[in-house]
C-alpha cells in the first residue's frame, strides 16, 4: 500500500484557518486521497476525498498537488470542535474488492485549537 | 438514533474467555467492517463483509472470527481472548453502490480489556 506522511501535531487559534499537509510520493494513478478525523472518544468520521482536482464541502477543502504527490486539507475557520486527529489515507480503486475497500490509517496529525 | 451502534460499549474479561462484540446499522449499507485501534495508533482492519455471503479476512484476523447474521448485523468474536487483544474496536459500514469514493461510517467503538 502507498504510504502517507503527516506531521504529528499542529496548533491553531480559534477562527483561523488550518492547513494540514500530507505527503504521498508513492501514490498510484488509481489511488483516491481520503481524509478522516477522529474526535476524542469517538470513531473516525469522513471529512473529504479527491482524485485529481481540488474539492470543497461543508467541512473542509482539499487541495491536491498537480503531480498528486502531496495534498493539503484546509479547515477554513477552526473551531474548538475541530480539535481531533486527522488522517490522510490513500484508497486504491483497482482491485477494490481484493483490497477490502479498506482504510489504512497511519498516525495522523493531532490538531489542537486554542481559544 | 445513531446509524451504527455497537454493543457493549465497554467490556472487561479474562484470558481464555469467549467474547462477542455486536454491530448493527440502520443505514441500509451492504458493506461492513471491523477495525481495532491500539493506543496512539491508527486503525487496522480485522474482517470485512461486502454482503451477507461475502466475508473476508483483513490484515489482522488471527484470533478473531465474524458472523454476518443479516445485512444490518455484523458480529466479531474472540474465541479465546488474550491480553494483547485489549484495544478499542470499531465497526464501520459503507455503501458499495457509491463507487470507489464511498465513505465509511463508524460506530462509537467498544473498549475491550482482557486481563
Image (tube, rainbow, N blue to C red):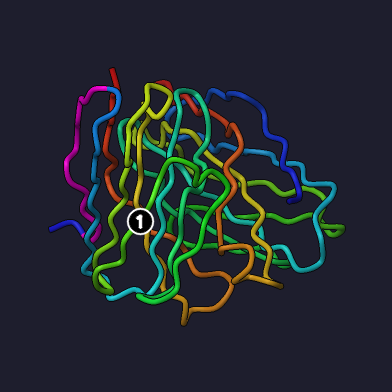
Label 1 resides on the chain identified as B
* Viewer-closest of A48 and B51: B51
Q: How many marks?
A: 1
* Viewer-closest of A21 and B114: B114
Q: Residue at x 49, y 40 (%)?
A: B43
Name the residue tied to disc 1: B66
Mark 1 neighbour class, 10 Å CA radius: few under 14, some 14 to 19, many 20 or more? many
Residue B40 coordinates in the image, percent (x, y): 49, 23
Residue B15 coordinates in the image, percent (x, y): 29, 23
Quadrant of the rendered structure where residue A92 is? Answer: bottom right
Tell me where the magenta segment starts and ends, as one range.
B3-14
Quarter of the image that includes the C terminus of chain B: top left
- Where is B66 relative to A104, above or below? below
Q: Residue at x 49, y 47 (%)?
A: B61
Quarter of the image that includes the N terminus of chain B: bottom left
Residue A67 lies in the magenta stretch: no
Amino acid at each position: 500500500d502507498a504510504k502517507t506522511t503527516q506531521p504529528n501535531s499542529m496548533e491553531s487559534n480559534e477562527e483561523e484557518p488550518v492547513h494540514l499537509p500530507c505527503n504521498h510520493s508513492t501514490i498510484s494513478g488509481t489511488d483516491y486521497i481520503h481524509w478522516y478525523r477522529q474526535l476524542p472518544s469517538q470513531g473516525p468520521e469522513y471529512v473529504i476525498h479527491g482524485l485529481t482536482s481540488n474539492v470543497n464541502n461543508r467541512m473542509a477543502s482539499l487541495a491536491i498537488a498537480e503531480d498528486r504527490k502531496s495534498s493539503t486539507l484546509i479547515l477554513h475557520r477552526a473551531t474548538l470542535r475541530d480539535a481531533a486527529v486527522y488522517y490522510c489515507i490513500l484508497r486504491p480503486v483497482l482491485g477494490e474488492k481484493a483490497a477490502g475497500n479498506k482504510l489504512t490509517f497511519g498516525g495522523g496529525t493531532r490538531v489542537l485549537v486554542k481559544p | 438514533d445513531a446509524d451504527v451502534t455497537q454493543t457493549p460499549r465497554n467490556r472487561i474479561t479474562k484470558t481464555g474467555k469467549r467474547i462477542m462484540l455486536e454491530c448493527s446499522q440502520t443505514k441500509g449499507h451492504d458493506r461492513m467492517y471491523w477495525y481495532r485501534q491500539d493506543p496512539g495508533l491508527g486503525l487496522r482492519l480485522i474482517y470485512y463483509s461486502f454482503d451477507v455471503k461475502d466475508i473476508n479476512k483483513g490484515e489482522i484476523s488471527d484470533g478473531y472470527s465474524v458472523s454476518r447474521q443479516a445485512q444490518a448485523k455484523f458480529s466479531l468474536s474472540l474465541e479465546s481472548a488474550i491480553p494483547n487483544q485489549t484495544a478499542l474496536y470499531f465497526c464501520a459500514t459503507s455503501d458499495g453502490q457509491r463507487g470507489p469514493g464511498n465513505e465509511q461510517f463508524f460506530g462509537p467503538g467498544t473498549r475491550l480489556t482482557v486481563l
